[in-house]
Image (cartoon, grey):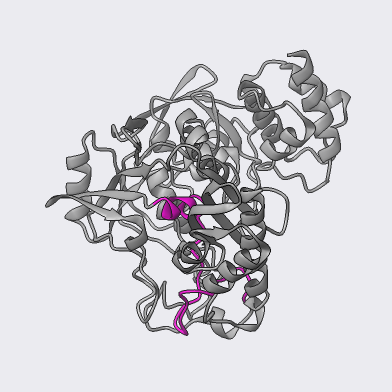
Amino acid sequence: MTTLTVNGTEYPLDLADPRVTLLDALRDRLDLTGTKKGCDQGACGACTVLSDGRRVLACLTLAAQCDGREITTIEGLESHPMQDAFVRHDAFQCGYCTSGQIMSAVALLGENRAGTDADIREYMSGNLCRCGAYSNIVAAVREVARHA
Amino acid sequence: MREFRYERPTTVAEAIRAVAHDPEADFLAGGTTEVDLMKDGVLHPDLLVDITRLPLRGVRRNGTMLQVGALTTMEELAADHTLAERAPFVVEALLRGASVQLRNMATIGGNLLQRTRCRYFRDPAVPACNKREPGSGCEAVNSVARMHAILGASPACIALHASDLAVPLVALDAVVHIESEEGERLVPLTQFYLMPGETPDRENVLRHGELITAIDIPLPPEGTRSLYLKIRDRASYEFALTSAAVAVIMDGAVIKDARVAMGGIGTIPWRGFEAEEVLREAPATPETFRSAADGTIRDPFLVPGTAFKVELAKRTLIRALTEVTS
């Protein structure tokens, strides 16, 4: 039995078949469906979560590798100012990429890389938004970074 | 994804033994290439030996050398102050590759071993790929190609080596530490990769059961100026069409010494020895740079979709040299 620690809660997980990715474990076994499956091949960023505080892609991480790591998903944020800023700046349309965008943006603040709009665009480039809400995403991140 | 067994040994020796004794076993590090290709059915190991918790992480200064543990992540190496000060083009190459999420996962050893982005290699529905199925042919040579190699290619394979990091590292004569049950051996990165020839399935000198444990990066002399220029289809989060890693030591307007390597054009990270010859003790002029570029892009293997890379690569190198010497 593997133990997965997500948002501070420990979940026992049967990984007799180790093909389970962290993304599928979160969504299908732990019912934490806030983390989205976009491309499932490491290209879109929709499945971004934090592992020991660093942003990673849940779709290319095997659940078995996360034993002993602290995983944080969008459900673990508890009304972070970034979520509020995304709402106020209308930083999404369909919303499918949004939890990945927010997890990435929260990590970006911790990395101290939100200095300029160009920096925000560069260091958020691993999160694609097919609706094209980029300018509003940058506005939301900029606002939270300035007040951080 | 085919079924596999998963093991996480606690020592380097155990990990090597586990892989060495199973011909279908593979090491698992960051997983950013491997898990992706396993999902696609391109790779199908029966055993994955997770090495991510082995003590092969961190950067150590050793005289005029940085010794980088193979499991150091791309983001960790990019944050190294000595590297930023002495060889900024390595940091630039790191930060222009992939995204932060991928760089937090991907390791330095794994980066050097990343598989080609050739779409025919990555799609098992395509029957012809000598790299995936030796002897089956090469779809890229006969079909639509663009993100492919023009140097070191052969009619059997034009798959590109897509690493940005490897480009400045071959320029600096980095050295790869390789461990196996027989002990340790050191291989210069310039001799690590194999050109496809008739055997595109063999990409480097690693034998089954051998593990990269560290990479030595010799630091260039103080006063060296370096630059990594990456040309791509979009501003960020994209592989190179062409790239140039250049490092020079200047004496006024004369180039005393130069290191040159190029990415986006070779089946292996391409060291520009001819360009370095041209540049050494030469004035930093457009004529010198053009001649260095002509010397590097010689006898390309072209298909219609890659012909544009000849002039683009030359201009990439000329611009990089112009910027780094001015």
Look at the magenta stretch and give its main secondary structure: loop
Residue A116, placed above or below residue B200: above
Which residue lies at the image location 16% right of the left edge and 55% below the top edge?
A: B21
Query: Considering the image in quadrants, where does the N terminus of chain B appear?
Result: bottom left
| Residue toward you, A28 or B222 | B222
Residue beneath the point at 59% across and 71% down: B291
Residue A110, given in percent of the width and then of the height, sits at 62, 21
Name the residue nearer the viewer: B277 or B7.
Answer: B277
Q: Position of residue A42 (x, y in %)?
A: 57, 48
In this rendering, is residue B144 above or below A34? Answer: below
Q: Is residue A12 above or below residue B8?
A: above
Task: Give the extent of the magenta segment.
Answer: B145-172
Question: Which residue ends up furthest to the left in the rendered image?
Answer: B182
Q: Quadrant of residue B136?
A: bottom left
- Residue at the (64%, 42%) spot, across then down: A45
Task: Pinpoint residue A113: horizontal percent, then vertical percent.
Answer: 66, 27
Does the image show residue A70? yes
**Is residue A110 found left or right of B32 in the rendered image?**
right
Is residue B41 in sight in this rendering?
Answer: no
Residue A17 forms part of the magenta stretch: no
